[in-house]
Image: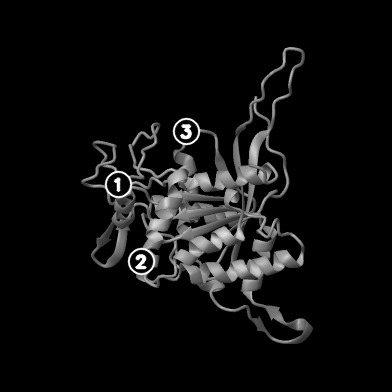
Amino acid sequence: MQSDPAPGPPAHDIAMWGAPGSGKTTLLAALNIALMRRHDDWKIIGSDAASSDYLIERTNALSSGKVFPEASQSLEHYRWTLVGPTERHKRRWWRRLRPAPPLKIGISMVDAPGGLFSAAPLRTGTGSGSVEDPRRRLMDNLVKSRGLVFLFDPIREFELGDAFNHLHPPLTRLAEKMLETGELRDGKLPHHVAVCITKFDDPRVLETAEKLNLLDPAPDDEYGFPRVSSEDARDLFRALCEVSASGNADMVVNALDQFFDRTRVEFFVTSSIGFYVRPQTKTFDWHDYQNLLPEAGRDLRIRGQVHPINVVEPMLWLGRHLAAGGSR
């Protein structure tokens, strides 16, 4: 018999950021769908009414409405708990162990407009009654967090090349705060970072991975979707950075290596909508896999069922390391 998870607020904070249009809101919406499609007991539960409402609305929009959730226009703070299967311990013959409680990973996530970090911090008003700019609230969340999700949109980088502009300012300010409080570790920030390379379903990203021989379908995937392992994801990241419109994407790679312990940075190749699956075949087809197509009167439409790829794994990776006290 499983024990109930311990009550109380989330124990760990995970912050998210990326350029506008990198898919932050969509990734959050896809998380619940991905958990529902898994064959295990992992589930996400809102820690308050606003977080539950967000989960319901975004999930319905993406799965039933087949539309992308609207991008964040203001600073929004949500709290969820990922609850998973009970950890099983080896039973000793001389004693009877009490059942362990289910794994519980708390997430406190601030979702904000993608451009919020690209400008200098501001204040409105003066004196003791001044109102701090929302960027300060978002920075406070980064300072408090020990798990970070950075979304890298390779299509936006190819067209606009501004990923570095949205990565460097928060890292600089975060390092300043950590230095001030004495929390740097060997000159590195103490956070674990999940770098999510988004839009894997886009032909330009998928075909780049194929040309580099980085595709390796998961043996237990019933649909046979192509995937890129975490071990190879850094190589894909570097290759995608080489076609940056600004030519500055190499500094994204270098900034991550300079600010964080490399053993605390993991790369994930993700897609919030996944690939198209024909109802008749229910398998991936190289000749017909695009799940996002243009439609008259609309920019794009989601063609078939939503099968998120690698959106749960970054959260579980972060949560497990945070729960273990930062050890690997």
Checking the image for residue 86, the label placed there is: none
In which image quadrant can residue 175 be found? bottom right
Judge left or right: residue 102 versus residue 224. Answer: right
| Residue of label 1 | 276
Task: Give amino acid for label 3.
Answer: His
Callouts 1 and 2 close, C-beta under 8 Å: no
| Residue of label 2 | 158
Residue drawn at 47 percent across, 49 percent down: 268
Task: Give amino acid for label 1.
Answer: Tyr
Work out how far the residue at label 1 is from the one at label 2, CA to CA, in angstroms. 24 Å
Tell me if I can see residue 17 in this picture.
no
Q: Secondary structure at mark 2?
A: helix
| Residue of label 3 | 39
Tell me if I can see residue 236 in this picture.
yes
Q: Secondary structure at mark 3?
A: loop
> Which numbered mark, 2 or 3, is in the foreground of this view?
2
> Does label 1 or label 3 sit earlier along the sequence?
3
Callouts 2 and 3 close, C-beta under 8 Å: no
Work out how far the residue at label 2 is from the one at label 3, CA to CA, in angstroms. 36 Å
Q: Nearer the viewer, residue 283 or 256?
A: 256
Residue drawn at 71 percent across, 50 percent down: 9
